[in-house]
Image (tube, rainbow, N blue to C red):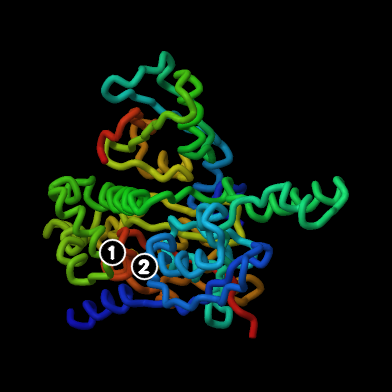
Amino acid sequence: MGGGDGRCGPMSDGGRALCDTLFPAVDVLLKAVGDTPIMRTKKWAVERTRTIQGLVDFIKKFLKLMASEQLFIYVNQSFAPSPDQEVGTLYECFGSDGKLVLHYCKTQAWG
Amino acid sequence: MTDDKDVLRDVWFGRIPTCFTLYQDEITEREADPYYLLLPRVSYLTLVTDKVKKHFQKVMKQEEVSEIWFEYEGTPLKWHYPIGLLFDLHASNTALPWSITVHFKKVVELLFFLKHFHCNLFLVSRVRERLLRSANFPEKDLLHCHSKDVIEAHFMACIKEADALKHKSQVINEMQKKDHKQLWMGLQNDKFEQFWAINRKLMEYPPEDNGFRYIPFRIYQATTERPFIQKLFRPIASGGQLHTLGDLLKDVCPSAITPEDGEQKTQVMIHGIEPMLETPIQWLSEHMSYPDNFLHISIIPRPTD
């Protein structure tokens, strides 16, 4: 099975499947919004299959926030992706200059 | 154009006859009759099942009621996927009504069993373990939905994501907050005209272009590990020709249309029908998207009868 589903496939599938196996992680740049604490390390290599929820849990741990505290993630400063969205898909659709820029905030920023 | 507007209505008013049954292990004071409902294909389970909740709450103790969730033949149904998509993906070629199992109950106390069944400790723990597995909210598969606000937030986020692809978010950002609210109210109250008064703006494009920048689509297959395929895809080729549904599938999911051993083993389904692969994807996006402005496409096994 091929066609860009992340598994090995022949080059005739437009190279997408091969791309997925050669580059399993994507570069994510995390930007703080408002007075949310800034992460010391902003650029991360994140596995394509990691979900937004997984990323939120990671950021919370890194910033030593409580699990009960809310954290909102935004793409293109315009929409909040679903917690089960995969980072790889967001990168494919909204990445630029080889990275996906995500804004994070403790309060709702762009509704 | 009159015909095309009819498609918009047909999509909006699509219904799936459904039978809701309470999960059999949920011990209740009295038997609960199944509850029958016509579900709107374009809406979300947690938005349209208040009556189902009320019906089953009647046979349960208030303190036992917990967050409702739905399941079909063992598969938890994601409330944040549109109902029509869930049906096409999981139950498309089965007999109607669609039989959905309702889960509602907090895990029964260990004490209850000790008191009422006089089981030995080993048996009690086995039963409790089974109850925990069956009655617990499936955290790995489902998002929580504690209020209608959660559904609204999810719905609006999808619309915004779709417009980011179609118009670099220009159209959605130019709208006022009350326009956004009208989209949600139209969906919530099943008001076609109210919804489309605003949504038609999201279906427009500059006269110099022949379509959207990229098409918002998601392709689902029940058989794969991935939740869905979503990639950038232009509706117009560099030479100006309109890309078709077949072109999209060839590019992002060729296995969906490649015959195996000379046979077409899969169906490509949107809103319960198989559109012709020659259909321009721009037209499909304008006329057969869900209210969230996405084309949700199911690839399912072709029935072998």
User: Residue at left 34%, top 56%?
Assistant: B216
- Where's the N terminus of chain A, which quadrant? bottom right
- Tell me: B102 left or right of A72: right
Which element type, helix, strand or loop, lies under badge 2?
Answer: loop
User: Residue at left 26%, top 41%?
Assistant: A111
Tell which of B17 and B120 is nearer to you.
B120
Are there few (<14), some (14-19), or many (20+) residues within 10 Å of tag 1?
Answer: many
Are there few (<14), some (14-19), or many (20+) residues within 10 Å of tag 2?
Answer: many
On screen, residue B272 above or below A111:
below
Q: Position of residue B76 (x, y in %)?
A: 57, 58
Tell which of B17 and B30 is nearer to you.
B30
Say which amino acid is labelled 2. Answer: Val
Say which amino acid is labelled 1. Answer: Leu
Q: Is residue B168 visible?
A: yes
Subunit ID for the residue under disc 1: B
Q: Position of residue B31 (x, y in %)?
A: 62, 73
Which element type, helix, strand or loop, lies under badge 1?
Answer: helix
Counting residues from the N terminus, which is met first, the one under dot 1 or under dot 2? 2
Q: Is residue B266 visible?
A: no
Subunit ID for the residue under disc 2: B
The answer to whether the residue labelled 1 contacts the one labelled 2, judged by CB atoms less than 8 Å apart, is yes
Query: Which of the labelled discs sits on residue B283, or is there none?
Result: none
On screen, residue B206 above or below A106:
below
Query: Label 1 belongs to which residue?
Result: B187
Query: Label 2 belongs to which residue?
Result: B42
- How far is the residue under mark 1 from the one under mark 2? 8 Å
